[in-house]
Image (spheres, rainbow, N blue to C red):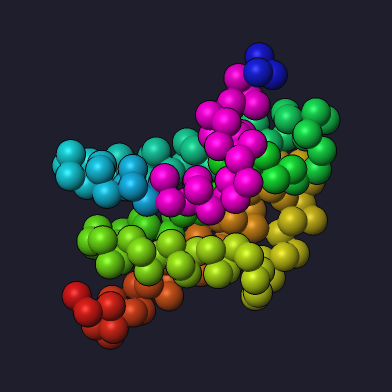
Amino acid sequence: MIQLHKWFAGCLGVGRVKGGGTITAILCCAAWLLLQKLGVEGNILVVVTSLVTALGVWSASMVEPYWGKDSSMVVIDEAAGMMISLLFIPVTVANVLIALVLFRFFDIAKPLFIRRMEALPGGWGVMADDVLAGIYSNIVLQLLIYYNITGR
């Protein structure tokens, strides 16, 4: 069972690659664009994002004794945060790229209480900072779209 959690937490091994968090976010963007092309939208994306987030909390908690606290090999948090960044956003290449830049900014800089989320225990701390970075990214992108700053 722990092997399964390692695969989930590391997003099928991407976490073992240098820059795995950024690679995971980029792959998530590509998957999001593909899902849009396939007609997947709305509630289905909310459910999938919620499941990835819940699985991330569980798997990150399970691998912590093996990989250490908030290991860089755990990248499911980046997938969940990136997905949250994209929820309820009109899916265009420009919007997805802006969401990626915003998410990585918030995830790396960790302003506005994001860093404090890391203090939560186990998988909650691993996931919460990225969830909050995703929420902030989504809010900023929603405002950019509303004020027509994205060029859309």
Instruction: Give the prevailing secondary structure in the magenta stretch.
Output: helix
Segment tinted magenta in the rendering? 4-27
Query: Residue at 53% across / 29% down in the picture?
Result: 12
Q: Quadrant of residue 44?
A: top left
Q: x%, y% of residue 66?
A: 80, 28
Q: Quadrant of the N terminus?
A: top right
Q: Position of residue 83 (x, y in %)?
A: 43, 51
Q: Residue at x 79, y 56 (%)?
A: 119
Residue extending furthest top? 1
* Near-viewer residue (84 or 108): 108
| In the image, residue 124 lies in the stretch drawn in magenta | no
Above or below — where is 62 with respect to 21? above
Residue drawn where x is 69% and y is 19% of the image: 2
- Seen from the viewer's position, the closer of residues 120 and 2 is 2
Q: Is residue 126 visible?
A: yes
Question: In this view of the protein, can residue 77 be seen by the observer?
Answer: no
Extreme-front residue of the structure: 18
> Is 84 situated above or below 49?
below
Position above or below: 119 against 41: below
Quarter of the image for residue 85 reads bottom left
Residue 114 image position (x, y, % from top left):
66, 66
Q: Whole-percent x and y of residue 74?
A: 65, 40
Was residue 13 drawn as part of the magenta stretch in this picture?
yes
**Along the line of sight, which residue is nearer the eye, 7 or 134?**
7
Residue found at x 30% / y 66%: 95
Give left or right: position of 34 versus 7.
left
Is residue 88 rendered to the left or right of residue 15?
left
